Image: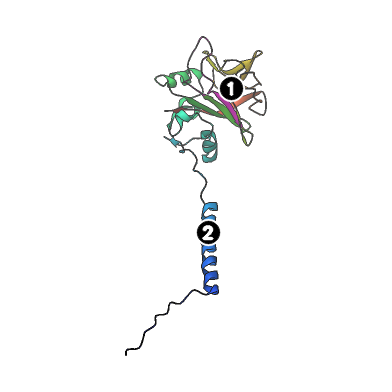
């Protein structure tokens, strides 16, 4: 008579059970760490400048781009006008704007080294009255970026005369104005944007000015 053969199946010990549980816990911890270490959402596509700016650095460009309307996110920036190339003339600025309809970022640096400017929802041009939309805003780096958006109080966004460019108004004051030679300018609190004085003084002299078309 043949002997019976017994087959033994080894059962996991408590120690092994513990190892299995701890393994699961370590896996869960690793997953949690991965979730915590997940990178933050990327910033909107950084603007592509056709040429280098003499006024703004990479940091200022990046900060300003975060406040632009979504419709221009990812659009290239084209330098339509700059005083170092086209001279200090408001009429020249208007001429360089001809043929452009897209939004414009106007940025300047004054004699104190202060950087400030405005975003216009449409190209800068000669006009009999004010034009633009609520996308228009004023800004200043002092030194941190401050953005002054439309308050809804009035619609005095942009007005262009031969001898004066005005942005924002109220009670006879302009948020930002530049004269015909693009050398003198001024800034006052105004109802349109409820802004602070953009420069260190209410009146200033322009050292460098650029107008970027975003399209």
Which mark's residue is nearer the viewer, 1 or 2? 2
On the question of residue 110 being in view, the answer is no
Quadrant showing the N terminus? bottom left
What span is in magenta? 120-140
For label 2, count other residues whose C-alpha is less than 10 Å away and answer few (under 14), some (14-19) or many (20+): few
The magenta stretch spans residue 139: yes
The way the protein has been coloured in the rendering is rainbow
- The residue sitting at 51% across, 57% down in the picture is 31
Task: Kindly report the secondary structure that dominates the magenta region of the rendered protein.
Answer: loop
* Residue 129 image offset from top left, x and y in percent: 53, 10
Q: Quadrant of residue 67?
A: top right
* Residue 45 image offset from top left, x and y in percent: 45, 38
Q: Which residue is mark 2?
A: 28
Residue placed most toward the observer, 150 or 112: 150
**Element at badge 2?**
helix
The magenta stretch spans residue 150: no
The answer to whether residue 101 is above or below residue 116 is above
* Residue 213 image offset from top left, x and y in percent: 45, 27
Instruction: State the residue lying farthest toward the front.
Output: 1
For label 1, count other residues whose C-alpha is less than 10 Å away and answer few (under 14), some (14-19) or many (20+): many
Tag 2 or tag 1, which sits nearer the N-term? Answer: 2
Residue placed most toward the observer, 130 or 162: 130
The answer to whether residue 26 is above or below residue 77 is below
- The residue sitting at 42% across, 79% down in the picture is 8
The answer to whether residue 154 is above or below residue 69 is above
Instruction: State the residue lying farthest toward the left.
Output: 1
């Amino acid at each position: 008579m043949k002997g019976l053969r017994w087959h033994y199946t080894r059962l996991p010990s408590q120690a092994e059970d513990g190892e299995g549980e701890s393994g699961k816990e370590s896996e869960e911890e690793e997953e949690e760490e991965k979730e915590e270490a997940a990178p933050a959402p990327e910033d909107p596509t950084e603007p592509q400048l056709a040429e280098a700016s003499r006024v703004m650095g990479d940091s200022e460009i990046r900060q300003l781009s975060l406040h632009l309307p979504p419709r221009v996110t990812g659009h290239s920036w084209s330098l339509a006008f700059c005083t170092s190339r086209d001279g200090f003339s408001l009429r020249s600025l208007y001429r360089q704007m001809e043929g452009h309809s897209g939004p414009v970022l106007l940025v300047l640096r004054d004699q104190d080294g202060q950087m400030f400017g405005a975003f216009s929802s449409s190209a800068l041009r000669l006009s009999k009255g004010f034009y633009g939309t609520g996308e228009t805003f004023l800004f200043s780096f002092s030194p941190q970026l401050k953005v002054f958006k439309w308050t809804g109080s009035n619609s005095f966004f942009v007005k262009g005369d031969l001898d004066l460019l005005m942005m924002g108004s109220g009670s006879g004051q302009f948020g930002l104005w530049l004269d015909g030679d693009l050398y003198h300018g001024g800034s006052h609190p105004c109802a349109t944007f409820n802004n602070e004085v953009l420069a260190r003084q209410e009146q200033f002299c322009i050292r460098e000015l650029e107008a970027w078309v975003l399209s």
